[in-house]
Amino acid sequence: MHYYIDGYNFLFRLVHAYENLQSSREQFILDLDKKISILKIDVSIVFDGTFQEGEGTRSHFNNVEILFTAQGETADEFILDALKYSSQPQQEIIITSDKKLAKLARNKQAQTESVENFIQWLNKAYKNKLKKLTNRSKFFNPVTTPKTSIPSNPSNPKVDQKIEGSTDYYQQIFENEYQKLLKKEPALDKKTPSKSRKPKEKEDPFPKIPPLAIDAPTQMERWEKVFEARLKHFSYQDVEKS
């Protein structure tokens, strides 16, 4: 079902909003949106655009469709025209306390409801829906006690008595014993020591002289032998010349 609300007829009938029209209209839309969002109904509010310039406007405020008629067109004319071109006018409900509009809408097979009756039904349905939602939330969200945390590595693991005699029972015992053995083994250092490299020896620019033997001649003795050999050589040459 779709609801057409005669906007200003609704406002003037219920809140007598002649003095502050804009603020009353905004409060009306806010309150209506809050309720229809819970009830999940399709609502369009039609306001007269008789004194505004230009074409009509269509907008949404959350779940509410807001319609302003074009210049010179009344809300009654807009609603009746919409019923004329509706494929299912019997699915339309016109909310108005204007008896003339209500009669013309019924002639076009639409349903009608007065503003007072609609407000009464809306408030009652809204309260019942809220009550159901509150009870449902309590049912699906019961109060739960916090769970105690289980240590990841218990010092003394216990065997579950429920699984004793099954393969899981012996597997659990094996796991417990295996963990005990792991604790007794010394921790192995996974890092292997890196091989030390010997530094490359640099060539000595001044080669070392090998040490002399103990009975080797001294430097002075070698020079004396060389001198004697030279002296004999020159003496021999002088004898040949003479």
Image (spheres, helix red, strand yellow):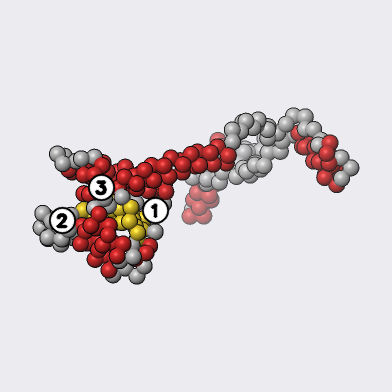
On screen, residue 184 above or below 205: above
Which mark's residue is nearer the viewer, 3 or 2? Answer: 3
What kind of element bears circle 3?
helix
In the rendered structure, are the residues bearing label 3 and label 2 in contact, judged by CB atoms less than 8 Å apart? no
The single residue placed furthest to the right in the displayed view is 165
Residue 18 or residue 171, whichever sits in front: 18
Q: Which residue is mark 1?
A: 41
Residue 56, by quadrant, is bottom left
Give the distance between the C-alpha atoms of the residues marked 3 and 1, in whole angstroms.
Answer: 18 Å
> Label 3: which residue?
10
Which of these two is toward me, 209 or 205? 205
| Cα–Cα span, label 2 and label 1 | 25 Å
The residue where tag 2 is placed is 49
Residue at image x 27%, y 57%? 102
Q: Position of residue 78 (x, y in %)?
A: 22, 62
Disc with the residue nearer the chain's start (3 vs 2): 3
